Image (cartoon, rainbow, N blue to C red):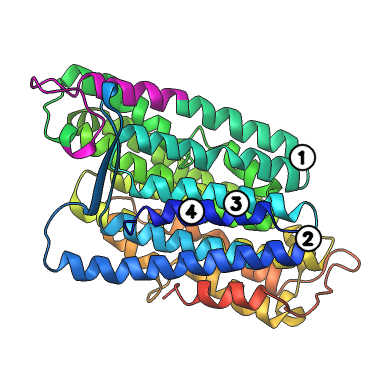
């Protein structure tokens, strides 16, 4: 068994083991062991990649190719580069943190952990795939469990949020499928065989008219999952209604599939189309940056604050990708990774607050700094990282791709609401009776916060 296929096989084996568990203790023990194994595999992959890349200059390493459907030239083709290795490590950390933050779940725990790990299986498979059909298959495996996770274990208008998320992402998937099939049927423009394999398509000169037609379909198909304005409206509702672990995976990992797909498929395979359409999508991305920032400032619910913040941050990622130069791409990748760590931690901290008080609103949780030092320390680190002071990951990515491309103050917008949050939520007064009481952080929550906070710097 190759090192990459294990990332698909191990979660599947954990799901099978969960089927035979009885009760919450067994379900969470199996899930925890599975999460630890996946994290160990991700760390091993990181060091193996560093060793191999020192002697091997190939674009993808640890490649494997197995024919699935010979008639359509569909392959189980896998391989990784530095971007996918980093995102796999991010996924493993957030999945394990999600298991810990769901430690006390008592409503269908076995089914919850199964859905969570099926989602993780799709994410891992997407990041290792180098065949368009296989990539699309894993993409759908990652997206579909979100309906169950929000619709069954969510809160508030969970059925509405789950259905809205599903319908918008399925609509985007329909556009994406058309774009992928368009790429496939033009992959023999130089006289070769039709293929779904990324590296083979990249060597083909796809006609300009075809690129201009299929680039926007492929870009929108992926970018909707990356909260592209104005197709972002599913994201805040989905975040707000999802259970804590699902919000962490949703914002920290799942939304990264959008930017990764845009970069790996739309821009890599259709460069001329990207050049033709970049101006239009730059406008939409910039609108998302500004809209998400100001919407976050006006919110009073902590989950909506972080959700709209993510819309703004990921708008910056798409903006950078559309700059079409290496410096901007480096910044976009760094920002995606740092946002994944920080927003997952932030949602974990929000989950702690939701479990401690019946007043989840922004202004009703005042003086959290006095009530729960664990929460306050974590949230200040997280808010600071998202706001982007020197020394933390956020500013590094932001300087790299935006400071010389947006008007003065542009890079500040996505983090502008966090100082307001510290003032109102962490130091502000309590505006509802009983709203300022917090139990001390206990149980599995320190295990969630400590590793996530360590990756801010």
Q: Earlier in the sequence, mark 4 or mark 1?
A: 1
Q: CA distance from mark 4 to mark 3?
A: 23 Å
Whether tag 3 and tag 2 are in contact, CB under 8 A, the answer is no
* Camera-side residue of 117 and 426: 117
Q: Earlier in the sequence, mark 2 or mark 4?
A: 2
Q: Earlier in the sequence, mark 4 or mark 3?
A: 3
Q: Secondary structure at mark 2?
A: helix
Magenta part of the chain = 174-199
Q: Badge 2 local density, few (<14 within 10 Å), some, or many (20+)?
A: few
Residue on which the image places disc 4: 253
Of badges 1 and 3, the one in the foreground is 3
Whether tag 4 and tag 1 are in contact, CB under 8 A, the answer is no
Q: CA distance from mark 1 to mark 3?
A: 31 Å
* Disc ID at residue 157: 1
Residue on which the image places disc 3: 16
Of badges 2 and 1, the one in the foreground is 2
Q: CA distance from mark 3 to mark 2?
A: 15 Å
Quadrant of the snapshot with the C terminus = bottom left
Whether tag 4 and tag 3 are in contact, CB under 8 A, the answer is no
Of badges 4 and 1, the one in the foreground is 4
Residue on which the image places disc 2: 23
Of badges 2 and 4, the one in the foreground is 2
Q: Is residue 186 magenta?
A: yes
User: In this rendering, would 13 be left or right of 272?
Assistant: right
**Residue at x 77% of width, y 51% of height:** 108
- The reply to whether residue 154 is visible in this rendering is no
- The residue at the far right in this view is 433
Q: CA distance from mark 2 to mark 4?
A: 28 Å
- Residue 346 lies, with reference to residue 221, above or below; the image says below
Q: Earlier in the sequence, mark 1 or mark 3?
A: 3
């Amino acid at each position: 068994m190759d090192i990459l296929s294990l990332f698909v096989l191990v979660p599947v084996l954990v799901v099978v083991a969960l089927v035979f568990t009885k009760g919450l203790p067994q379900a969470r023990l199996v899930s925890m062991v599975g999460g630890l194994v996946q994290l160990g595999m991700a760390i091993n992959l990181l060091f193996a990649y560093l060793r191999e890349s020192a002697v091997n200059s190939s674009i993808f390493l640890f490649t494997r190719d197995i024919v699935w459907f010979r008639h359509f030239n569909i392959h189980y083709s896998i391989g990784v580069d530095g971007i996918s290795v980093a995102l796999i490590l991010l996924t493993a950390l957030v999945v394990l943190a999600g298991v810990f933050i769901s430690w006390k779940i008592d409503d269908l725990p076995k089914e919850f952990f199964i859905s969570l790990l099926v989602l993780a299986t799709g994410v891992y498979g997407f990041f290792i795939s180098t065949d368009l059909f296989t990539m699309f298959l894993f993409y759908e495996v990652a997206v579909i469990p979100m309906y169950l996770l929000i619709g069954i274990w969510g809160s508030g208008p969970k059925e509405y949020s789950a259905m809205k998320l599903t319908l918008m992402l399925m609509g985007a998937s329909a556009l994406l499928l058309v774009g992928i099939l368009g790429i496939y049927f033009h992959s023999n423009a130089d006289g070769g065989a039709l293929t779904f394999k990324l590296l083979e398509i990249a060597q083909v000169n796809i006609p300009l008219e075809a690129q201009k037609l299929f680039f926007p379909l492929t870009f929108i198909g992926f970018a909707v999952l990356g909260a592209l304005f104005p197709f972002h409206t599913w994201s805040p509702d989905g975040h707000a209604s999802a259970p804590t672990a699902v919000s962490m995976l949703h914002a920290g990992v799942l939304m990264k599939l959008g930017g990764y797909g845009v970069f790996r498929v739309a821009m890599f395979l259709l460069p001329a189309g990207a050049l033709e359409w970049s101006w239009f999508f730059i406008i939409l991305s910039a609108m998302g940056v500004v809209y998400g920032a100001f919407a976050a400032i006006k919110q009073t619910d902590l989950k909506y604050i972080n959700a709209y913040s993510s819309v703004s941050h990921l708008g910056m990622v798409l903006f950078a990708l559309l700059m079409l130069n290496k410096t901007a791409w480096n910044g976009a990748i760094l920002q995606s990774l740092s946002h994944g760590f920080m927003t997952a931690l932030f949602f974990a901290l929000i989950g702690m607050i939701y479990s401690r008080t019946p007043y989840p609103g922004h202004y009703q949780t005042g003086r959290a700094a006095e009530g729960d030092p664990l929460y306050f320390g974590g949230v200040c680190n997280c808010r600071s990282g998202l706001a982007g002071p020197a020394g933390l990951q956020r500013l590094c990515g932001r300087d790299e791709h935006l400071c010389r491309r947006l008007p003065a103050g542009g890079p500040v917008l996505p983090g502008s609401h966090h100082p307001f949050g510290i003032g109102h939520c962490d130091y502000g007064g309590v505006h509802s009776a009983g709203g300022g009481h917090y139990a001390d952080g206990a149980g599995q929550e320190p295990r969630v916060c400590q590793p996530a906070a360590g990756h801010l710097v």
